[in-house]
Amino acid sequence: MRVELNELTKRWGNVTGADNITLDIRSGEFVAFLGPSGCGKTTTLLMVAGIYKPTAGEIRFDDRVVNQVAPKDRNIGMVFQSYALYPHMSVRQNIGYPLKLKKSPASEMEQRVQRVADMMGIGHLLDRRPAQLSGGQQQRVALGRALVKEPSLLLFDEPLSNLDARLRLTMRSEIKRLQLDLGITSIYVTHDQVEAMTMADRIAVMQEGKLQAYAPPNELYERPRTIFIAGFVGNPPMNLFDVQVLREGERLLARRQNLEIELPPERGGRAAGKEEIIAGVRPEDISLIPGAAGSSEGAQGEVFVVEPLGRDNLVDVRIDDLHLFVLADPRQPLKIGDPVRLHFDGDKVQLFDPETELSLLWT
Amino acid sequence: MSTNLTESATQPLGAGRGRWLLLAAGLVLVGCFILPWLSFVITADQRVALSLTGLQAATIGLVETTDGGLLYRSSFWLFLAPLAGVVGLALGALNLFPGRSAPWQGLLALFISVASAVAVWGAFAASQEVAQKEKVAVEAQWGLSVAFIALLLLLVGALILLREASSQKPAFRAALDALNFMTPGTVLVIVFFFLPAIILFILSLTDLSSANFSEPWTYVGFDNYKRMFSDRFFPKILRNTFQYVALTLLFFNVGLALLLALLTAHVSRRVGFLFRLLWLLPRITPSVVYIVMWQRIAQQPPYGILNQFLGWLGVENQPYWIPEAPWVFVVLVNGFVGASFGMIIFTSAIEAIPADLIIAAKVDGAGDLALIRDITLPLLRWPLLFVVTYQTLSLLVSFEYILLLTNGGPGLFTTEVWALTAYKRALQTYFGSNQWAYGAAWGFVLVLIGAILSVIYLRVFRFNDLVQEPKIDVL
Ligand SMILES: Nc1ncnc2c1ncn2[C@@H]1O[C@H](COP(=O)(O)OP(=O)(O)OP(=O)(O)O)[C@@H](O)[C@H]1O
Ligand SMILES: [Mg+2]
């Protein structure tokens, strides 16, 4: 089923939960709503579910406007962070509840509950109460309950946030696999960008109720259209700092104090000659060379903090008053205070206009 | 701005204001409770004394005594006995001598028990002396207080001895430790339920009444009970009581309460709050005023509000409604008061249901009715059990609105319920005779009915299933 949100807005008095959200979701697509706490993800999701009535705008399922359709008639499955299992019902009754409401015959109900439970790997737990299950098992039950009526739209509200890191990883891939196999259109709310990046076909980034970007993960990563997206997407986050962009003969340079990056002409064109530009470089696009070398390219700094991440070291390098995060090979022996030289990959540098906060490359 | 608001909302009262409020609350307490109580004690009204607990009655007996030395002796013993009891309770329950070995603890317990017994015996002997000297039947009252104290002490002694005897057997000990956790509750139940009930029972086996209260009371066995069960109006009263409790409970204390809670939970918070506040009005109105209000509603034309409305509609010459339909009014009057209790309990229980559960059910396909049937009501099971049980019991023993509204009439026993009969027999002058013992028999059977009903309720609602298994194992 296709889902279309048109200038969707939700207000309570002067509190705005969602502000003018417009996006479309293709049939079978997996879309993540990503954004910091309080940005309106749940609000938007609950409007799609029919729990909140939109203040303005419309919601379409396929071509039908569903603003006035009650939640029970929307054929939606939903999974919550809190699992929201009915505590007074057994697992069997929990999963079967949507079917019971549809008045499915008992034998069919029994069959479908068993099938879904087996699919979720909880077939042996059917007679337990939710309180007698672990968090991971409860979330599987919740997923089973959402799937059992074969909904045309699945809504997830941070379903994995209460699970431990390892279980989160397994469940992440399980949900993704299920969604692919069943081909159900899905909206997945999360503030964990790794989840969003790994699972979603497209990510809707929200901030303060507004839709900031709606694009596939790699595009968000490589072509951030605003400073917010650049800073929000990616872990560890992108380094953002003020520069001047100057022409020196043939060369185009982004410069600040003792830092200099050579920009390819097609990248820096629009920024050339501007006094104030915000440059963004991801930690993995900076290379770190220990010691003090002579060249004026790049920047000279000293190691401020080293955070071992296992595969990489995240090094905080201080250049005068600027701190940059750099991913470095953990085999490089680095101590606090060591002088290092940084080289920047000019092809990966992002440039933003500080006034409009928009990218000078992608807008 | 908003932070200011929340801060002042969560802050405790300013020190100055808090003190004034406390003082005011204290004055109200003194004015409403302590002064009247003291005046009862000082005027030593026998009837009042009987409606108080045994200990209070004993105090009144003391006040009445004119012999100074005797007064001193009996008060000494009287206050020593509870003191010994309290010390025993504290030692036994709180295990104040944890380091001592079991034999020591046993000896200690034995000592406390013996000391208590001596104190009780002293109090009893002193009371006998008072009775003889003054030639009044304070005896009954004295006996009751002594029974009260003695039972308390017996229990303490038994508890301590049991505890010590069991210290060698771990399983038994664990069970006792569990009981120890409930000590405060147990003590309250014993003092405020068991002992008064036992006193009531003892009283019901005597012939104490205002006709013979200056002579020593005599034991008459179950005569009062025989008389009660063979009363011509006994079946009528029984039926009335059942009808009163069942109708009020079903339609108002639970039915209307649930309806009000469900309704007010689904409108905006402020409207709901105002609505519930209005429904509290009957409860906070003094009974007499409240009943006068109802009588005003039902009066004959041209005074009655109901009849005025009917007059405007062209229905003339209507009667005073209360004698016409006494049962309707009995149930309405009690129901309007009773509904607010369940309403508040249910409302808070409904509001405590996590929003996610409601959303999940709606998304799963539940309409409003299915939501209430499948989610809200099952999750209200515990408050429902509580309200049904509690309100059955309070209705069973309540009678003041009926007393004021119809006094059991019109005619003979039309709306007379059990508790009203007990009250009338024991305390309402009836041809100048208060049959205290006979009234106590009615009262005691009512206590038994209440206790049996509670057990049935707990079974029917499968109380044990409602209580979750503890997450923390007892080691
Ligand atoms: N019922 C409500 N009444 C008033 N304001 C609300 C209500 N629900 C949400 N809001 C406000 O709307 C904004 C968006 O809330 P929402 O729950 O959608 O955030 P979210 O993105 O889901 O955050 P989180 O990641 O913490 O769950 C918040 O500022 C919140 O305070
Ligand atoms: Mg949320």
Image (cartoon, grey):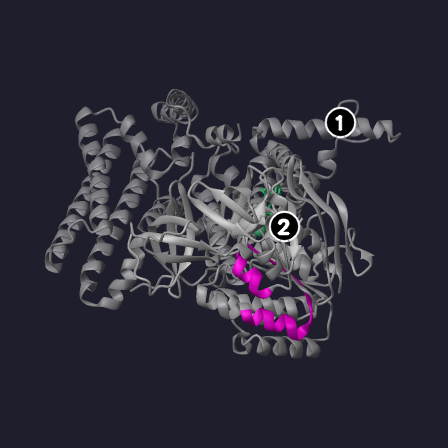
Q: Residue at x 68, y 38 (%)?
A: B329
Q: Where in the figure is residue B241, as x and y percent of width and height?
A: 59, 48
* Between A243 and A260, the one nearer to me in the picture: A260
- Which numbered circle lies on residue B305? 1
Label 1 residue SS = helix
Nearest to the observer: residue B96 or residue A30: A30
Displayed-image quarter of ligand 1: top right
How packed is label 2: few (under 14 Cα within 10 Å), some, or many (20 or more)?
some
User: Of all residues shown, which one is farthest toward the front?
Assistant: A249
Q: Would you say A329 lies left or right of B302 here?
A: left
Task: Name the residue tied to disc 2.
Answer: A361
Q: Chain of mark 2?
A: A
Query: Which percent across, then down, holds residue B335?
Result: 63, 41
Q: Nearer the viewer, mark 2 or mark 1?
A: 2
- Per the model, the C-alpha gap separating discs 2 and 1 is 81 Å
Tag 2 near tag 1, CB within 8 Å: no
* Above or below, A350 relative to B12: below
Q: Residue at x 41, y 53 (%)?
A: A342
Residue A50 is labelled as none
Where does the image place residue B402, in percent across and percent down from the top left?
60, 37
Q: Residue furthest right?
A: B314
Find numbered disc 2 in the image and state the secondary structure of the residue it sits on: loop
Q: Which amino acid is tagged 2? A: Leu
Q: Is residue B170 left or right of residue B103?
A: right
Could you say where residue A196 lies in the image, as x and y percent from the top left? 57, 60
Is residue B374 one of those drawn in magenta? no
Q: Label 1 marks which chain's residue?
A: B
Judged by its main secondary structure, the magenta piece is helix
Q: Magenta part of the protein: which range?
A: A173-199
On screen, residue A67 above or below B125: below
